[in-house]
């Protein structure tokens, strides 16, 4: 879940960068415009992924590595 969320956040960051630099919305372009249902679903998933990634800031990563090794 962490990697999938991070992937979506990266996609969202790239999309925002394209909007800022070129005024081009990649997600809207690929999925039929900003108002298209599928585009709105993807924007929502990116937003949820961003919220999920907030939890990464507060996790004890050393403890997570120890659990994987056991």
Image (tube, rainbow, N blue to C red):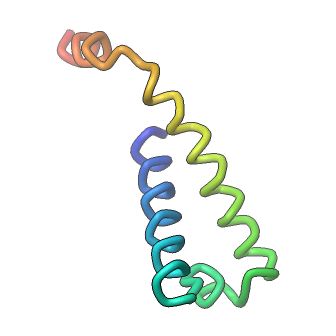
Q: Residue at x 53, y 34 (%)?
A: 54
From this view, report whether residue 7 is shown above or below residue 21: above
Of residues 27 and 67, which is closer to you in this image? 27
Q: Residue at x 22, y 11 (%)?
A: 66
Q: Quadrant of residue 43?
A: bottom right
Residue 65 in picture, x, y percent from top left: 24, 18
* Left or right relative to 33: residue 23: left
Residue 12 in picture, x, y percent from top left: 52, 64
Q: Residue at x 75, y 70 (%)?
A: 40
* Left or right relative to 55: residue 51: right
Residue 2 in picture, x, y percent from top left: 44, 39
* Left or right relative to 7: residue 23: right
From this view, report whether residue 54 is shown above or below residue 48: above
* Left or right relative to 11: residue 60: left
Q: Hey, which residue is sitting farthest front in the picture?
A: 21
From this view, report whether residue 58 is shown above or below residue 12: above
Q: Residue at x 61, y 40 (%)?
A: 51
The quarter in which the C terminus is drawn is top left
Residue 69 in picture, x, y percent from top left: 18, 15
């Amino acid at each position: 879940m962490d990697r999938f969320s991070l992937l979506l956040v990266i996609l969202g960051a790239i999309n925002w960068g394209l909007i800022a630099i070129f005024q081009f919305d990649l997600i809207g372009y690929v999925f039929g415009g900003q108002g298209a249902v599928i585009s709105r679903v993807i924007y929502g998933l990116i937003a949820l992924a961003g919220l999920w990634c907030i939890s990464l800031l507060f996790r004890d990563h050393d403890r997570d590595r120890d659990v994987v090794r056991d």
